[in-house]
Image (cartoon, helix red, strand yellow):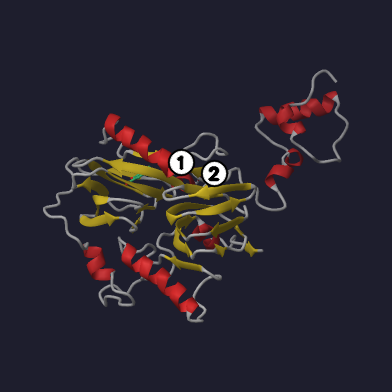
């Protein structure tokens, strides 16, 4: 043998039926390489694991670190055409420095100073905002101004024109979730700049057009009976989420089966035209652990990002555990076991790529 075979190909294998290395075999591997061919027997361990092994890692970002950096970006970096948004993405340490929280999901903190506008554009990526603190920004979707306040969830389906305007005298930060990595890998992204002038808001209406039409529980306008793949409701207000969760815990205390497990109330944000997820690629939920609650360990195909809305608790993802507090964001990669406990109560916003796997019949879950 004159030289060792390419380590990329041959040493990657854990197959035990490999032929003796010979000059002929080496020449064959080199020929594969120059023709951009890869024999399966050197890659099978990585591509056919017995169960999902995500490249993404469990990771936690502390809000108390993120927010001052976003404020600093607010002082130093203008927002405008080209950059489009002062959004700072969470880059999972397992994903090669790309600004991807998980293989499918983008998560970012966005920051807007008093009086600032983020310009009008649209893209095929499905998006949402979730507000952990503050108010004063209106997100304007196809000309409909939607107020953003603490605890609100604001979905934003792909290909709708949108801009953000801070009409207050306070800066505001929130989180954005999008299916950017999924659309990037699958080559399905389109983007279009909107008009240069920002959306004119003469007044700051407390209720958007979309809420006036769609924001009445169980009531469907007869003019809109056709199902739409994404939700037409542009704001899910905190008062409703909070009330639904506390209602579940009260019902449980009265002996009714209203919680997903003891002390664990949960709701899913849904599309009122279908009852399904709000966006075709993104599932969003809110979870409340009553004081003293310990969840079962759960694992599922697909990845999630959680943000602590209020309270404190301990979270374990795979081999990693953290004590979490308000604003902290953490990632649960595919098939990594998740469990949580809270001594004093914990409220969590969650988003995941579950609809993708359900549409493709690749969803699987396990509870221990
Ligand atoms: C975007 O349009 C927003 O509208 C946030 O707030 C983050 C990241 C990449 C591309 C577009 C927004 C984004 C984004």
Residue drawn where x is 46% and y is 38% of the image: 99
Q: Determine contact: label 2, label 1, CB under 8 Å.
A: yes
Which residue is the extreme one toward the right?
Answer: 20
Say which label, 2 or 1, has the lower sequence index: 2
As drawn, is 313 to the left or to the right of 17? left
Residue drawn where x is 73% and y is 44% of the image: 45
Callout 2 environment at 10 Å: few (<14), some (14 to 19), or many (20+)?
many
Q: Nearer the viewer, residue 170 or 331?
A: 170
Callout 1 environment at 10 Å: few (<14), some (14 to 19), or many (20+)?
many
Residue drawn where x is 39% and y is 38% of the image: 88
User: Which residue lies under the disc numbered 2?
Assistant: 59
Q: Is residue 42 visible?
A: yes
| Element type where label 2 sits in the image | strand
Q: Nearer the viewer, mark 2 or mark 1?
A: 2
Q: Nearer the viewer, residue 46 or 96?
A: 96
Q: Position of residue 190 (x, y in %)?
A: 37, 45
Mark 1 beta carbon near ligand 1 (under 8 Å)? no
As drawn, is 312 to the left or to the right of 167? right
Instruction: Name the image quarter holding the N terminus.
Output: top right
As drawn, is 102 to the left or to the right of 63? right
| Element type where label 1 sits in the image | loop
Q: Nearer the viewer, residue 29 or 194?
A: 194
Q: Position of residue 311 (x, y in %)?
A: 44, 56
As drawn, is 143 to the left or to the right of 46? left
Mark 2 beta carbon near ligand 1 (under 8 Å)? no
User: Which residue lies under the disc numbered 1?
Assistant: 90
Instruction: Name the image quarter holding the C terminus.
Output: bottom right
Rendering quadrant holding ligand 1 = top left
């Amino acid at each position: 043998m004159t030289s060792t075979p390419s380590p990329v190909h041959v040493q990657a294998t854990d197959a035990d039926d490999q032929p003796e290395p010979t000059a002929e075999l080496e020449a064959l591997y080199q020929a594969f390489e120059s023709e951009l061919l890869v024999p399966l027997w050197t890659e099978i361990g990585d591509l056919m694991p017995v169960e999902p092994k995500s490249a993404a890692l469990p990771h936690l970002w502390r809000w108390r670190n993120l927010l001052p950096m976003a404020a600093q970006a607010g002082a130093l970096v203008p927002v405008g055409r080209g950059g489009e948004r002062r959004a700072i993405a969470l880059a999972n340490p397992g994903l090669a420095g790309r600004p991807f929280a998980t293989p499918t999901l983008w998560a970012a903190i966005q920051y807007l100073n008093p009086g600032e506008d983020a310009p009008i554009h649209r893209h095929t990526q499905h998006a949402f905002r979730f507000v952990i603190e503050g108010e004063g920004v209106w997100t304007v979707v196809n000309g409909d101004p939607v107020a953003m306040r603490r605890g609100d969830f604001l979905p934003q389906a792909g290909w709708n024109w949108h801009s953000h305007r801070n009409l207050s005298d306070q800066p505001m930060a929130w989180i954005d979730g999008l299916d950017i990595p999924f659309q990037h890998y699958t080559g399905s992204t389109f983007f279009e700049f909107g008009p240069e002038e920002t959306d004119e808001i003469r007044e700051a209406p407390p209720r958007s057009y979309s809420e006036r039409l769609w924001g009445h529980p169980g009531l469907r306008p007869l003019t809109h009976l056709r199902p739409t793949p994404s939700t037409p409701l542009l704001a899910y207000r905190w008062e409703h989420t909070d009330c639904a969760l506390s209602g579940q815990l009260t019902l449980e205390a009265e002996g009714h089966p209203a919680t997903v497990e003891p002390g664990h109330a949960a709701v899913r944000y849904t599309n009122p035209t279908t009852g399904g997820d709000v966006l075709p690629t993104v599932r969003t939920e809110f979870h409340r652990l009553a004081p003293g609650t310990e969840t079962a360990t759960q694992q599922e195909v697909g990845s999630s990002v959680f943000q602590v809305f209020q309270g404190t608790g301990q979270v374990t993802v795979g081999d990693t555990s953290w004590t979490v507090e308000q604003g902290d964001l953490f990632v649960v990669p595919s098939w990594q076991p998740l469990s949580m406990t809270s001594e004093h109560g914990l409220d969590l916003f969650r988003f995941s790529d579950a609809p993708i796997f359900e549409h493709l019949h690749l969803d699987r879950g396990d509870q221990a």
